[in-house]
Amino acid sequence: MSHSNSPSPQQSLSASQKRQKLRQVFTGTDCLTPASVHDALSARVAQIIGHQIGMLGGSVASAVTLSAPDLTVLTLSELAQCVRAICRTSNLALFVDADHGYGNALSVGRTIEELEHAGAAGCSIEDTLLPARFGATQEELISCDEMLAKLHAAVRAKQDPAFVIAGRSIALKHEGLEATLTRLKAY
């Protein structure tokens, strides 16, 4: 009997196969609910009960890693470590909330490299200004041009063409429906 923390080699999917699985879900017609996972055990349980897709939210990663609310103090290396543990022990195609990508366009490229290396199938990047300005009471929206630069940097940084990158927006809180739709179409 094996005491390994990993699926057996006969069952293991490569990171690229997991990414292909996520792409198939996004382009398919079935509506699947991802399992909200936070560690290796929750990912393994989700897989056992039949989930194909896992989702790691930024607030969940912060709660598990720091035992703290999502105040955007979780580092990229801490997030990547959490992703690595989940991906190493399950065949879930893991989609990760990468918040704002941990900085500017240059930092977003690094974020993609780290998440891809950790085994994630894809991630979302949000158009928020982070870190927040001192004294800010709510999230601030960055310009559409700055967000497009981040998304272009993300696409350039990925090594596996199957890795999914999704733009996410808080614009509806700030700009209204028409401007939000224009922004989302650009993303």
Image (cartoon, rainbow, N blue to C red):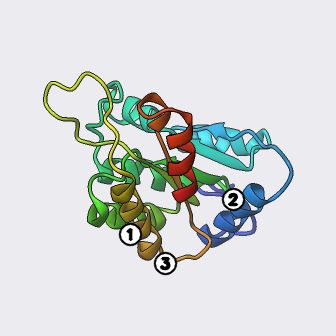
* Residue farthest front in this picture: 178
Viewer-proximal residue among 21 and 15:
21
Residue 3 appears in the picture as rendered = no
Label count reads 3
Q: Which mark is residue 78?
A: none
* Mark 1 neighbour density, 10 Å: few (under 14) some (14–19) many (20 or more): some
Q: Position of residue 86 (x, y in %)?
A: 53, 50
Give the labeled residue for mark 3: 159
Whether 66 is drawn above or below 79: the answer is above
Give the labeled residue for mark 1: 153
Q: Position of residue 17 (x, y in %)?
A: 68, 70
Q: Are circles 2 and 3 on residues that touch, CB within 8 Å?
A: no
Whether 87 is drawn above or below 140: the answer is below
Horizontal side, residue 130 vs residue 182: left or right: left
Looking at the image, which residue is at 48% across and 42% down? 169
- Tell me how far mark 2 sits from mark 3, CA to CA: 16 Å
- Tell me how far mark 3 sits from mark 1, CA to CA: 12 Å
Q: Which mark is residue 22?
A: 2
Whether 135 is drawn above or below 23: the answer is above
Horizontal side, residue 113 vs residue 51: left or right: left
Viewer-proximal residue among 1 and 162:
162
